[in-house]
Image: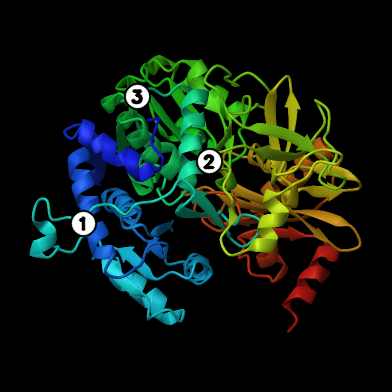
Amino acid sequence: MTGHRTFTELIQAQAEQSPDREALILLTERSGRLWPETISYAELDQAARTLGGRLRRHVAPGERVLIVQSSPALFATGFLACLYAGAVAVPVAPPGGRPHHDERIAGIVKDAAVSCVLTASDEAADVSQLLARTGYGHVTCVLADAAPPALDAAPGQQLPPAGAEPDAVAFLQYTSGSTRDPRGVVVTHRSLLANQQAISRALGTRPGARLGGWLPLHHDMGLVGQLLHALWLGGTAVLLSPAAFVKRPAHWLETISRYGLTASGAPDFAYDLCVRRINDAQIAGLDLSRWRIAVSGGEPVDPQTLRAFAERFAPAGLRPEALIPCYGLAEATLLVSGAASAPATGQAPAHCGPPASCEVRVVDPDTCEELPDGRTGEIWVRGDGIGPGYWARPAETAATFDGRIKDGDGGYLRTGDLGTLEGGLLHVNGRIKDMIVVAGRNLYPQDIERTVQRVSALFGAASAFAVRGDRERVVIVQELRTGSRYDTDLAALAAAVQQQLTEEYEVATGAVLLVRPGTVRRTTSGKVERAAMRRLFLRGEVPALHQRVDPEVQRLLAAGRRP
């Protein structure tokens, strides 16, 4: 795990030292069950060398390769093949049939100047059609699962991995785009290895550990935190698909139980989903006593969710101290703060532990003055795990990655997140750009959303944002859960939402929209896209089962619909 200059060298060493060790256990859902496929380090290394050799026929070292793979096996092989070929991997979510997801992929192809797309036979048609209709039909698609030529398949004939320097670009991690267009974060071998070391120190992961889960591999938490961290440890990544988890949340915890995972994590919503949808009989079949590191990250952590999860799964052997809130972002490769010794199931709000091998400052975003403990400001970060900037965006790189504290030094990443340091522990409050300001008061949208969701058991995901007329007004777009009866008195539910917000926050609600499941737009990593929801609302493009809109907001909607 140490002494290697690049991640490529590290993987080669793992394959040489432990060729027969399980690198991946990949679980595929069929007929309600998960069926395993095991890949050893030697097999993974050979497959990556073979595919890397094929890639070199299409791309030169340093050129970008888009990885569009639903299969975890093909994703892992394709990612390592890019490293072996000296190419720059660009992971993205597979086309999802939604226009904004297709637009995101096309935007990344343009932004990264992609030379080649690595996909699979069963996804090639969709990918090719997407490229063609967005003006990128000339980009070559390489099938990762195509039968290799005889020379490539022969043992010992695979091309050796390309050499790389520590500061060479390993991959581009595109941001979720929850508040703005996605940017490609440059992750070098140096920053990747530094962040892996930070994760291990903060969370106490051990060499040879089994870890994994269902997180999508195109997202930094799944890629860096589960797949690559397992390989960095010389351990085993046990992976199931996000679809398998959503279809049956018990699959996740059964995987942890059956394969003895010591570390696994997910965003807050996944823990809540498990509490609501895993029944007593399923819990009786679980053994979660070996699950030492249950990371909650990727979105604001709700301490009530952690407490409910700890209580619900205590009979299965889950220890409350295993639940560990963490904070990170793509610009920092992954982890910024978190610690296995600092669980937060009892605090409100939950903290995300101490900084993990990096400097963290809380700074006034307007004056750039560092703030004392207990004051809320923008979180600034500096350390070896921070990426060098955004791909081909020098102005935005300078503005984001070279924050300078007033009367102090520079080189800090400005995260755009609000937080507080208290006693060396970091509390994260939300995104600056999502902040709702009403009558001079700062309100966090996630707090409003949680308040609304407590109004009724019929309520699922929500989005809260502000629109400006003669003054700021709060708008709530609230999904009804799948299976909800839409003949319920929706007018009474909407009125109850308005009353709850008036009582708890003393704010008048400009609009409440009750909508079908799936209406609230999310990024590919599951974050609510509040800015996108605001734009859709103002254009009158949020279909509602029922809505209450005050006259001033109605005038804004009318103005937004005019050609």
Quarter of the picture containing the C terminus is bottom right
1 or 2: mark nearer the eye = 1
In the displayed structure image, the side of residue 499 where residue 2 appears, left or right? left
Residue receiving disc 2: 334
Residue occupying image coordinates x 62% and y 40%: 456
Q: What amino acid is labelled 2 in the image?
A: Leu
> As displayed, is residue 243 above or below residue 184?
above
Could you tell me if residue 285 is visible in this image? yes
| Residue type beneath disc 1 | Leu
Q: Is residue 412 above or below residue 539?
A: above
Residue, disc 3? 207
Circle 1 is placed at which residue position? Answer: 159
Q: Residue at x 57, y 31 (%)?
A: 326
Picture quarter containing residue 315? top left
Depth check, front residue: 162 or 216 = 162
Quarter that holds the N terminus:
top left
Residue 274 is situated, as x and y percent measured from the top left of the image, at 44, 33
* Colouring used for the render: rainbow
Question: Is residue 527 depicted above or below 25 in this figure?
Answer: below
Q: Label 3: few (<14), some or many (≥20) within 10 Å?
A: some
Residue contact between numbered discs 1 and 3, judged by CB atoms under 8 Å: no
Find out whether the residues at labels 2 and 3 contact each other: C-beta distance under 8 Å. no
| Residue 151: % across, % down | 10, 62
- Taking depth in this image into account, of 437 and 384 the one nearest to the observer is 384
